Image: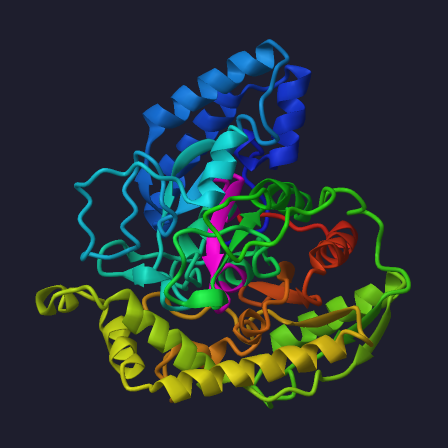
């Protein structure tokens, strides 16, 4: 781990589209692909702890059924036979959903699929297992009293980010090319940046969600993949309707894959290295994002250095986030609360101190922020920022050593604002630090501008191809 070239390319290193092409040509089978993913898990997961549950028997059963369909030339679904992982936040039929918590009884009936899981199942993705999360997905790194510490595939002494850190590490190491994560304040984008993969937080409501999150409309589901094409393909599947989400958008009129290679010529793109907050950005991150922004000029876009004119909404985000955390544990007994991650227990206690007026004031700030960003996108098609202002830091910590602020939001100023505004935002790799750690570029679009975000991400990816870390 930590090098930039795979030791030897196997089926575990293929993208979903490469796998599907191989199935269609009869050159590869879903069983081979699933066995390769399972071998990669056996070889690599001890070092990173991406999975808390691996169900090889069930995965191979699904793969054999898929293989038979492909042999009959009757594939069923757009992901038929592609190994996929599920974050341990999503309800999954026949598998426990423990949310990284010792307070949830695993010995109960698990009979329901969340919408994202249901869509993946309908399209016959092969479910390999469930990936790790911090308890109740509450923070931007991945460790929990139940699952332990999830580590970075490029350097296991560093964090994978979170809260979808297990999903990101799994994708980065070829332990299934597709993953589904959640994002309430950056939770697919942060680990995507730290682990060197692609992730998208789509416009709120684009991917139906159930049960409703205690974090309310901050919470999104999102695809996590090896390339932008896979992200678009997965979004097509995940955007299909589900009546259980009353706030879901109407299904898109076309495919997100269509027009993906149309490029960015003529688009007006803003780049901001600190959103105007004065946030410290590591010089290596700053240089990589600046270089990436200039690459968009070479691709024909008009790029300007400009801040969107917003103020840091972190205190209002805390009101919404910490109150949601308090809601999520309100049913627990005093004894169960003692089992919680200490940091989670702290923010739940803080969440209980807020009044209804505090919550409404935070909601008002959120609306004003959304209005400002809506006006900004009347001029600029897209906004580029760092995904995270620093490289991955020591694993097992909520914040970098020596930080004066104890909370994860102190080092994620570029992600949570766009959960508040419900805008689509992707993270794509844009370089490495001198220590060999990935750097993420965030591409933000206006609400409902998911296709434009993906198109820009794909344009950059085509011009600057990316490679996974070495696995041995």
Closer to the camera in the image, 295 or 366? 366
Closer to the camera in the image, 192 or 438? 192
Q: Give the residue drawn at x 36%, y 67%.
A: 138
Percent x, y of residue 327: 30, 69
Residue 27 versus residue 451 in the image, above or below: above
Closer to the camera in the image, 47 or 387? 387
Horizontal side of residue 107 vs 357, given as left or right: left
Q: Residue furthest top?
A: 72
Percent x, y of residue 227: 64, 46
Percent x, y of residue 417: 56, 76
Horizontal side of residue 11 vs 143, given as left or right: right
Q: Give the residue drawn at x 43%, y 62%.
A: 162
Q: Is residue 133 visible?
A: yes
Q: Give the residue drawn at x 82%, y 76%.
A: 379
Residue 42 versus residue 76 in the image, above or below: below
Q: Quadrant of residue 25?
A: top right
Horizontal side of residue 85 vs 8, given as left or right: left
Q: Is residue 176 visible?
A: no
Q: Which residues are magenta?
A: 172-190
Closer to the camera in the image, 52 or 308? 308
Q: Residue furthest left?
A: 335
Percent x, y of residue 99: 30, 54
Horizontal side of residue 267 vs 31, given as left or right: right
Q: Quadrant of residue 267?
A: bottom right
């Amino acid at each position: 781990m930590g090098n930039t070239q795979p030791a030897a390319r196997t089926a575990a290193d293929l993208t979903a589209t490469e796998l599907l092409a191989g199935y269609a040509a009869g050159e590869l089978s879903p069983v081979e692909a699933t066995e390769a993913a399972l071998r990669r898990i056996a070889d690599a997961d001890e070092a990173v702890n991406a999975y808390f549950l691996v169900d090889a028997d069930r995965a191979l059963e699904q793969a054999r059924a898929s293989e038979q369909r492909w042999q009959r030339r009757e594939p069923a679904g757009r992901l038929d036979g592609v190994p996929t992982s599920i974050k341990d936040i999503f309800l999954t039929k026949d598998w426990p959903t423990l949310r990284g918590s010792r307070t949830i009884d695993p010995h109960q009936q698990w009979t329901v699929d969340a919408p994202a899981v249901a869509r993946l199942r309908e399209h016959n993705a092969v479910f390999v297992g469930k990936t790790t999360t911090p308890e109740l997905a509450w923070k931007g790194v991945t460790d929990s009293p139940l699952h332990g510490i999830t580590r970075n595939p490029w350097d296991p002494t560093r964090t994978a980010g979170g809260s979808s850190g297990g999903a990101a590490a799994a994708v980065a190491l070829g332990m299934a090319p597709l993953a589904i994560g959640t994002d309430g304040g950056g939770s697919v984008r942060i680990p995507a940046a730290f682990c060197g993969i692609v992730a998208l937080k789509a416009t709120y409501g684009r991917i139906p969600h159930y049960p409703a999150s205690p974090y309310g409309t901050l919470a999104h589901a999102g695809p996590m993949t090896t390339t932008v094409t896979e992200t678009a393909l997965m979004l097509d599947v995940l955007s299909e309707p589900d009546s259980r989400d009353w706030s879901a958008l109407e299904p898109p009129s076309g495919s997100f894959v269509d027009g993906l290679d149309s490029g960015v010529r003529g688009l007006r793109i803003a780049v901001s290295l600190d959103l105007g907050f004065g946030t410290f950005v590591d010089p290596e991150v700053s240089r990589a994002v600046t270089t990436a922004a200039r690459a968009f000029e070479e691709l024909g876009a008009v790029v300007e250095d400009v801040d969107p004119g917003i103020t840091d909404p972190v205190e209002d985000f805390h009101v919404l986030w910490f109150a949601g955390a308090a809601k999520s544990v309100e049913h627990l007994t005093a004894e169960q609360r003692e089992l919680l991650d200490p940091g989670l227990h702290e923010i739940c206690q803080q969440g209980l101190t807020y009044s209804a007026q505090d919550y409404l004031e935070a909601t008002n700030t959120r609306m004003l922020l959304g209005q400002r960003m809506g006006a900004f996108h009347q001029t600029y098609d897209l906004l580029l920022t760092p995904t995270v202002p620093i490289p991955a830091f020591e694993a097992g910590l909520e914040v970098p050593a020596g930080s004066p602020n104890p909370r994860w939001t102190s080092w994620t100023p570029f992600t949570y604002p766009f959960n508040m505004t419900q805008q689509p935002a992707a993270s794509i790799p844009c370089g490495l630090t001198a220590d060999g750690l990935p750097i993420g570029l965030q591409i933000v679009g206006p609400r409902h501008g998911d296709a434009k975000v993906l198109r820009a991400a794909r344009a950059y990816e085509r011009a600057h191809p990316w490679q996974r870390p070495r696995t041995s």
